[in-house]
Amino acid sequence: MTEAAVSVVLPAYNEEATIEHTVHTTLDTLADFLPPGSFEVIVAEDGCDDATPEIADRLAAEESCVRHFHSDERLGRGGALERAFRASDGETLVYFDTDLATDMSHLEQLVDSVHTGGYDVATGSRRMPGERQDREPERGVASTGYNALVTLFLRSDLYDHQCGFKAFDRDVLFELLEDVEDDHWFWDTEVLVRAQRAGYDINEFPVQWTPKGDTTVDLVRDVLGMGSQILRVWWEFSVEPRATRRVGLAAGTVLTLVALALMTVYLDPDAILDAITGADYRLVVLSGGVYLLSWPLRGQRYRDILHELGYDGDLLFLTGAIFISQTGNLVFPARAGDAVRAYVVKARRQIPYPSGFASLAVERVFDLLAITVLGGGVLVGLLATGGTDGLAAAIAADIGTVDIGGQSIAPGAAARTALRVAAVVGVLAVTGVAVIVASARRDTDLVHRLVSRISDDSYAEYVSTAIGRFVGDVQAVAGDRGAFSRIGLSSLLVWGGDVATAIAVLAAFDVAITPYLVAVSFFAVSVGNLAKIVPLSPGGIGLYEGAFTLIVVGLTATITAPVAIAVAVVDHAVKNVVTMIGGVVSTLVFNVSLVEAVEGAADVEESVSTES
């Protein structure tokens, strides 16, 4: 160690207009209360592309107590601070923002709190009770919301976590940094939260603060960056200590019971029993067997998708993972069950979360494409000629209102809505596939350029890397013609099994199966599935039945509306029951503890940070 007892670090990014003034002001202020030679000022220059490096070099040459650390690449504010602190000499480590937004009259109190006052950490605060600071409304609301979230999720007792005016005992800071993962703007918050958790003494005192520089809300920094870091630390503090294997198994069991209970809400047993009256129960059971046979095809398709992304998995496990996620989609809104599959394949097969979600996106694209192709141009023709309105009116007059799952469904209105939703989804599916295939043939970093247009913050690279990996994985499949054809064919077979199930249910209602009816069934099931993709009703109840009934009644002369809607109800129920049973069995067979999930989340954070 040199004679310098206090090291002040100034994090600098493109500060050519202010850095010289800031350094001289800092030296003059320190000299007012510290002996000569007892302090140093370090400019932690973070990949600047202006004249800041040259100015910092000159200042270091002119002043023996000034040092300059240059980085060719952006390290993020936390990364730049940590690098400079580790190279510093002082036992008391200080930093503040180079815009001098905090009044420098508080610097002596900041330094002395740690240097001679016995505190381990000191931080200025713009939000102490009774203190008011002038802030632009937009940024003030964002700051209030952010600190409220930190208090709520991370149980912090401090009022202001992001004030750039802090001091640390050297040994304390380096001990805390062993666990700090963020290198960007959340670094301040994470250090303060971990210091409280470790029981260190923290002095938070009010400061006079004048907003300068960037006072706007940045989507990448404030939401995607810092928001995700709050969730990461919350998970580490609140879930990991309690996430034993026994707890994981118990939680899985409870969720299974909840899913079974909710199944009676989505699938009203009375409505199903009413619909099935008069049907051949043996053929209804057979339809369940037919639907079950399509699941290994789903597993094989998912296996092919993962293989194209560079990951392997056994068929039985991947089929079980799909069962579990699809069961979640029956229970939770907006296809939230898909996230369960990303978790399962990460925990058991070490497939990173970006790739896991990309594989789901690829699967969804092929699902939409397959059922759009199966639906064909008949839907467009019906909509173009206005034929759907007449058919819907006829259905409504024939069967009136039907109760399904505790809801009163007007089949005519449901049918019209379902067809319009299906048309929009179908167009979006084809357009999406075209865009993905086209973009896959271009060697451009489109994601990085788009994120950079939104934000030039140090989090931009971090966020664009994660999103870019996701998009790249989707393009990897779309850009391979062989894989595209193979997965497309298996998707057609998967949805062919869906249609075969509906045909078996039609047979159970003593409907004569003809080649024409098979073709109508392909169209009816495809449109019904397109309609229920948008979560306008729980489990797609009503939309699927309305679309199916409209198509079958409108395109056949022998099947009446009451029979058609009864078939639709039973068909939908059979598929959901098979899915639920498969999900329950798979949950028990392939149980993954929450401990593994936490470890997986930590791994993906580390891998993304390393790549960025």
Image: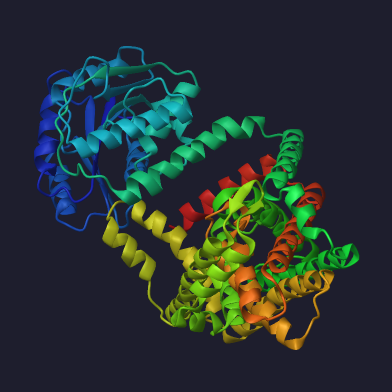
Instruction: Describe residue 604's horizontal placement relative to residue 183 as left or right.
Output: right
The x, y position of residue 471, in whole percent, is 47, 67
Q: How is the image coloured?
A: rainbow
The x, y position of residue 289, in whole percent, is 85, 66
Against 298, is 459 above or below? above
Residue 112 in sight here: yes
The residue at the point 23 percent across, 54 percent down is 48
Instruction: Describe residue 540's horizontal placement relative to residue 316 as left or right.
Output: left
Frontmost residue, 414 versus 3: 414
Instruction: Describe residue 83's horizontal placement relative to residue 26 as left or right.
Output: right
Residue 97 is drawn in which quadrant?
top left
Against 591, is 345 above or below? below
The x, y position of residue 16, in whole percent, is 13, 50
Residue reaching furthest to the top: 117
Against 130, is 454 above or below? below
The x, y position of residue 252, in whole percent, is 73, 41
* Placement of the C terminus among the 4 image quadrants: bottom left
Instruction: Describe residue 141's horizontal placement relative to residue 442 as left or right.
Output: left
